[in-house]
Image (tube, grey):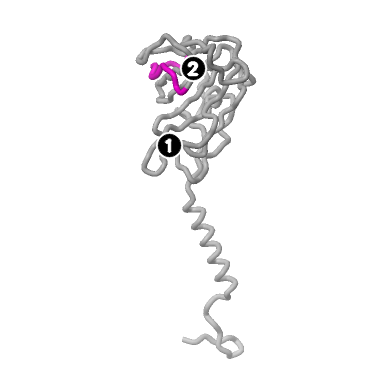
Amino acid sequence: MQYTSATGSPSDPRPPKSITVAICKILFVSLVFYTLPTAHASTVRPDATPHADMWLAPIESAVETDVLTPFVPPDMPWSSAHRGIDIATSSTEVLAPSSGQVTFVGVVVDRPVISIRHSDGLVSSLEPVTSDLAVGDSVSQGQVVGKLADESSHCAIQCVHWGVRKPDSWQIGSTTRDLYIDPAFLLGWVEPSILWPIHSDPVF
């Protein structure tokens, strides 16, 4: 069927080329944004709001300004990063940041470490810390779990390194790795402002 304009000349029923190009661009951009993986917050919590009674710093009376080196999340599980925070201290006693069960006491590379699994599934690791506790021992929040080792220093001044991870919670292809989170967020010292890169997909 042929269309005729008001002047009697044949007209093309197709829309102008400029409109067609504009529609294609809109569809392309929409498709790209729809298929992008969703970015995830770099910190993960047992729930949505902080609980001051659930977590405390592993150094008595420590405050936010005592943090010497903040948490720096890795881009990928094997990437270089700072998977915890360093807290300056004049005391050698190290406390359990939350109640739980000891899962490791020993040396990792060249530093003594103690790890505690908490009731929410998160695992705290504290170093360089020597301890008389054994795997399987239960600990209460605020309990002294060890002392800073004299022969090993993680910082320029005396400090404890506190890392927190959620085991097997970062999915990379068909494998899962531990997801490290910011301990300072658990204390309410920082906000969860950093996002995971879109090429990775942590599973909570």
Q: Which residue position is annotated with label 2?
A: 97
Label 2 crowd (10 A; few <14 / some 14-19 / many >=20): many
Q: Is residue 25 left or right of residue 104?
A: right
* Mark 1: amino acid: Trp
Mark 2 secondary-structure assignment: loop
In this view, the residue in front, 29 or 116, is 116
Dividing the picture into quadrants, the one containing residue 176 is top left
Task: Say whether residue 63 is magenta.
Answer: no
Label 1 crowd (10 A; few <14 / some 14-19 / many >=20): many
| Disc 2 from disc 1: Cα separation | 23 Å
Residue at the farthest left position:
136
In the image, residue 108 above or below residue 134: below
Residue at the farthest right position:
65
> Which residue is at 51% across, 27% downward?
49
Image quarter (top left, top right, bottom left or bottom right) of the C terminus? top left
Q: Which residue position is annotated with label 1?
A: 170
In the image, residue 26 above or below residue 167: below
